[in-house]
Amino acid sequence: MTTGVLQSLHDRLRRHWRDYLELTKPKVVALITFTAMVGMLLATPGMVPWPILLFGSLGIALMAGSAAAINHLVDRRVDALMARTRHRPLPSGHLETGQVLGFALIIGALGLALLLVFTNPLTAGLTFASLIGYAVIYTLYLKRATPQNIVIGGAAGAAPPLLGWTAVTGQVDPGALLLFLIIFIWTPPHFWALAIHRRNDYADADIPMLPVTHGVAFTRLHILLYTILLFLVTLLPFLTGMSGWIYLVGAVVLGLRFMSYAVRLFARGENRLAMPTFGFSIVYLFGLFAALMLDHYSPRLFELLRPWLS
């Protein structure tokens, strides 16, 4: 009997693996995992122990994927109303609610177990709190309650570098909070640009995103204001001595480019610029955290290259 059940599960997974992968929002999880790994690397002047780097990152990724799957489950009726999401596994009928819930619980439990074994209880607890914050508090309540949903709910999405940091140190330090702040401020202009592009979908689904409740012009202004604030916040790692000149150059170049998108979106009033702004915001965050990592390890890199440069 057990063999038959396992074989049936195996066959289902083989047929639907793309649907299960889509449940985890792999592109989002990849960015989450990258920022978490950068948090780990910045938390120590040396190298991160490989079990923490490997299994800690995997645990965070699995729990992020679990939160995404729960988001699919909770939003299945809304997703069926929106052109962007109606082909997802649940609205399309490719998967059933029980399959999605079981998948979310399995990978979430596995991720939590990895964090408890290979990192520390603080990281496991904070990661679980982030999962609840996104999958339950944001998705079930905030998303439908206020046009400031993404500002308040952005705290869950800003947690990964803090989680990476605590996985190494076992404590919340000012540097970890600064990384958290950067993503927290980045989230509204990133998501509001997408919301402008998909405002009709959100209106049809009766979700009070800012472009729906306050208009596109108001949203464009707030994207610009948040992008300016983000530029200032990203200078703090240099000003506090956390990072050096390599990071500063990267932050300024990327920040000015991001602001140029926001300025054009605001000044021209052309909604077709919303998706390019959204797309660059992802490149921006990846580049910013890559600059943090490169700056952190540049002294060691120069030492390795010194014999070749002399």
Image: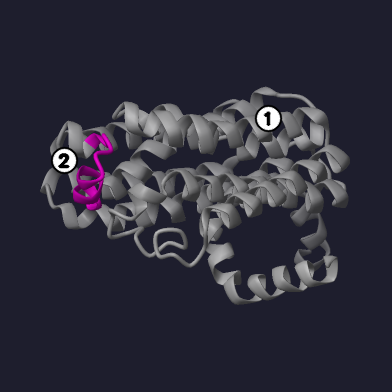
- The residue at the point 60 percent across, 25 percent down is 240
Q: CA distance from mark 2 to mark 1?
A: 35 Å
Query: What amino acid is at disc 1?
Result: Leu
Which type of secondary structure does the marked residue at label 2 adopt? helix
Q: Position of residue 259 (x, y in %)?
A: 31, 44
Q: Position of residue 21 (x, y in %)?
A: 58, 64
The residue positioned 83% from the left and 67% from the top of the image is 1
| Residue at 48 percent of width and 50 percent of height | 72
Q: Dots 2 and 1: beta carbons under 8 Å?
A: no
Q: In this picture, which residue range is highlighted in magenta?
A: 197-210
Q: What number is the disc on residue 216?
A: 2
In the rendered image, is residue 137 in sight? Answer: yes
The image shows residue 253, relative to residue 138, as above or below, that is below
| Mark toward the start of the polypeptide (2 vs 1) | 1
Quarter of the image where one finds residue 12? bottom right
Report which quarter residue 178 is drawn in. Answer: top right
Q: Look at the image and tell me in which quarter the C terminus lies.
A: bottom right
- Could you say where residue 145 lies in the image, as x and y percent from the top left? 33, 27
Q: Could you say whether the residue bearing mark 1 is in a helix, strand or loop? A: helix
Rate crowding at label 2 as few (under 14), some (14 to 19) or many (20 or more) other CA atoms within 10 Å: many
Its colouring scheme is one colour
- Would residue 244 be counted in the magenta stretch? no
Circle 1 residue: 126
- Whether residue 235 appears in this view of the structure is no
